[in-house]
Image: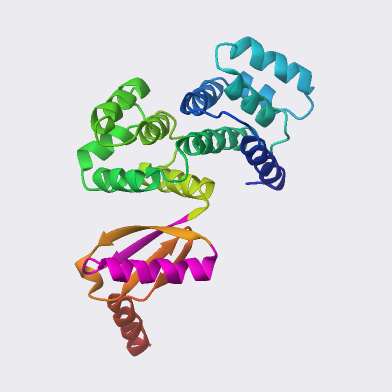
Amino acid sequence: MGSASRQALVAAERTLAATAGVTLAAGEQLLSAGRAIEGSAQLRGLLADPSLENAEKAGLISTIFGAIDATASALLLAIATTRWSDADELLDGIEQIGIRAIAHSAGPGAAIESELFEFSRAVSSNSDLELALADKLGDPAAKAALVDRLLTTKASPSTTAIVRHLVQSPRGRRIGALLSGAASIVADEAGRLVATVTTAVPLSAAQQKRLTGALAAQYGREPRLNIVIDPTVIGGLRVQLGDEVVDGTVASRLSDLRLQLAG
């Protein structure tokens, strides 16, 4: 994100934190508004135009999105009347605040990150499902209906709402990256980190507790562990937190050794 967009996003996050009574419906409506703005180049350009007066933007939002509830409308107005680097980053901001609003409404104890991770694993292991959700020419409503069928009885309404939005608004992004990014946003809203841990064998409860404590001590925030079992790593652990990767697997060390010998 550009500098202006980063500042705008921080301001929007503060507005959300100060807003009382945020509901799942408000988050869904904000995401829906974002998709509508995405579908109109003219509206997108107007709301991202820094020369357009805030009163005019407020009038546009009131006219076009008059049916959404007061909370969603106020959040959308706060986002649109802040300067963004470009229209695409305005859409990013609406999406992030919509996802945060859903996570906020669910509370810090919700398992949204874990459910997003499990769904991501299910998608990556099923090429037909991945193709159906990632098809650029696919009908967004059909994709949302597919998500409903897959998740309604297996995940929370909050997780389902987030995934329904993501498959309808990929904007050139891969489904795995969308789900991973959403999980990180949800974790951050709850004051946690998402740590993806790759190991050759399942970790015991005691091992998970020690790893959680070590990561919390290092990063100052409680991590939510997503465990991936991959026998090819042979032994050790690979831990990924956002863009940071700590690879202590045997496979990685053997690869390093081979490179050293080859050199």
Q: Is 216 included in the stretch rendered in magenta?
A: yes
Side of 26 relative to 132 (left or right): right
Which of these two is toward me, 142 or 28?
Answer: 28
Question: Where is residue 206 drawn, in percent x and y?
Answer: 30, 70
Q: In the shown orientation, is residue 54 left or right of residue 142?
A: right
Which quadrant would the C terminus be assigned to in this image? bottom left
Q: Is residue 174 visible?
A: no
Instruction: Name the spot of residue 3 as percent of width and height, x first.
Output: 71, 48
Q: Is residue 68 magenta?
A: no
Q: Is residue 57 above or below residue 124?
A: above
Residue depicted at 61% across the width and 31% down the height: 20
Residue at image x 37%, y 87%?
Answer: 260
Pick the front one: 154 or 139: 154
Left or right, 90 with reference to 102: right
In the image, which residues are magenta?
193-220
- Looking at the picture, the colour scheme in use is rainbow
Inspect this view and state whether residue 249 appears: yes
Q: Residue at x 53, y 45 (%)?
A: 189
Instruction: Where is residue 131? Give x, y as percent.
Output: 27, 37
Is 150 situated left or right of 157 in this image?
A: left
Determine whether 45 is above or below 127 in the image.
above
Instruction: Return the x and y of residue 98 as percentages of the image width and height.
Output: 53, 33
Residue 92, by quadrant, is: top right
